[in-house]
Image (cartoon, rainbow, N blue to C red):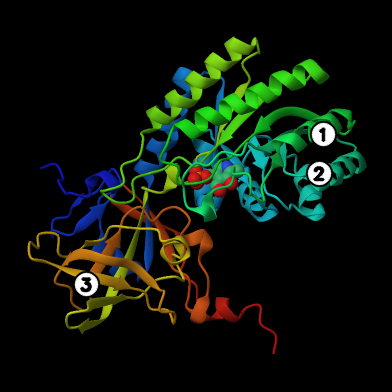
Amino acid sequence: MAFQHKLSAILPDTASLSESGHLSLGGCDLIRLAEEFGTPLYIFDEATLRRTCTEYGTEFGSRYPDTLVIYACKAFINRALAQLFKEEGLGLDVVSAGELAIAKSVAFPLSKAYFHGNNKTREELELALDWGIGRIVVDNLYELSLLTEVAKRAGIVQDILLRLCPGIDPHTHRYVATGVVDSKFGFPMAQGKEALARALAAPSLNLIGLHVHLGSLIYELKPYQEAVEIVFRFAAEMKDEHGFELLEFSPGGGFAIPYTLDTPAPSTADFAQAITSSLLSVTEELGLNQPRLIVEPGRAIVGRAGVALYQVGGIKEIPGVRKYISVDGGIGDNIRPALYGARYEAIAANKMDADEMELVTIAGRYCQSGDVLIRDISMPKLEPGDIIAVPCSGAYSIPMASNYNAVLKPAVVLVKEEKAHLIRRRETYEDLMRRDIL
Ligand SMILES: Cc1ncc(COP(=O)(O)O)c(C=O)c1O
């Protein structure tokens, strides 16, 4: 019988019920995974990961063949995922030499890596060039000078893109809006002209493209279309003034996914259609060549593929006020709700057929009152020992995890065809103290 659950749309593709009636992913009963690997536990469904990779390639590539999809590692990367993205033929967006080192460790073709960030260090730039990185996405004038010098010393002519800040509000949380006027990222449009002229004049740099990234968790299509318009008009102007030829263009990432049932997001096809149609019409209107399109999804690739599992512990009811259900994770493994009010759904993985529900608040275990994972959610009657699954936990949870309260960071498993592979072991107390010096 096909799995039918009101949360199917935000669960990984392989979600089903196990023989014991528990929630199962990739053919693995989640209660058994919790017993085997402990909680909190992050579970990634390989089928969903590979499907989203293919979907981005197909939806953009069928409309605009010269497209390269590069996965934004900041959403979550480790060696197993880097290996998977390599197999899927994606490129990578990295923002540190650390992310680059993870990619290098699995022989990821670094010619398909794009180095982003507003304050890359000299050491990171030297390492990236030494390792043969494909592109540096230059963020500001200081970095432009620094890279010019680093590339010159290395005897390299480095391919670069300039990151422009188009001054567009994508109506997302201000902590994740990056293309607005008041942003630390990218060249304001007026300064972009100076940057472009300087880049063209630098013998150790080869300016091949322009990049924008408007922000993250963008539910609208129009901001992308506006960004395309702005960048191509700028490119046309720079062609007239400097003979600049735009060979690569990136509208960044930021594609929203539906975290909760009341926040539907556009489909991959919708994003692809909006961006590629604008790109085709503006290039035609301005008589420009069609550049290679670089899209940078992060959340959209890993978000829905990941589910977090927590075990219920203490329960506190304040009559007439609230019922707190405390779990064994929280801001240490997922800071998003506390940081910017991110919302999630939850399922009692061992009580899938319960029909009596009550309103509760799922609190984390950390010593901060703000450590609340989900406020006011309808759940079955929960007891200590129950296992709660939080869908759409694949993006920006683990990479922002901390050891606050000296709590160990969780394990991560990849499930596929009834097998669960540990792809990051749980931390140990030795890990916690490894760098301490007495
Ligand atoms: C330059 C750049 N590209 C892509 C992304 C990925 O964003 P998302 O995970 O929302 O797709 C980010 C995220 O901050 C980014 O800064």
Quick one: label 1, few (<14), some, or many (20+) residues within 10 Å?
A: few
Q: Which mark is residue 141?
A: 2
User: Horizontally, is 94 left or right of 154 in the view?
Assistant: left
Q: Dots 3 and 1: beta carbons under 8 Å?
A: no
Image quadrant in which you'd find residue 229: top right
Badge 1 marks a residue whose secondary structure is helix
Quick one: label 2, few (<14), some, or many (20+) residues within 10 Å?
A: some
Amino acid marked by disc 1: Glu
Separation of residues labelled 3 and 1 (CA atoms): 60 Å
Separation of residues labelled 2 and 1 (CA atoms): 9 Å
Q: Which residue lies furthest to the left in this view?
A: 355
Q: Dots 2 and 1: beta carbons under 8 Å?
A: yes
In this rendered view, identify the residue nearer to me: 33 or 299: 299
- Residue 153 in percent (x, y) is at 92, 43
Residue position marked by numbered label 1 in the rendering: 194
Q: Residue 89 carries which label?
A: none
Badge 3 marks a residue whose secondary structure is loop
- Residue 146 in percent (x, y) is at 85, 47
Amino acid marked by disc 3: Asp
Badge 2 marks a residue whose secondary structure is helix
- Can you see residue 58? no
User: Horizontally, is 239 left or right of 30 in the view?
Assistant: right
Q: Which of marks 3 and 1 is nearer the N terminus?
A: 1
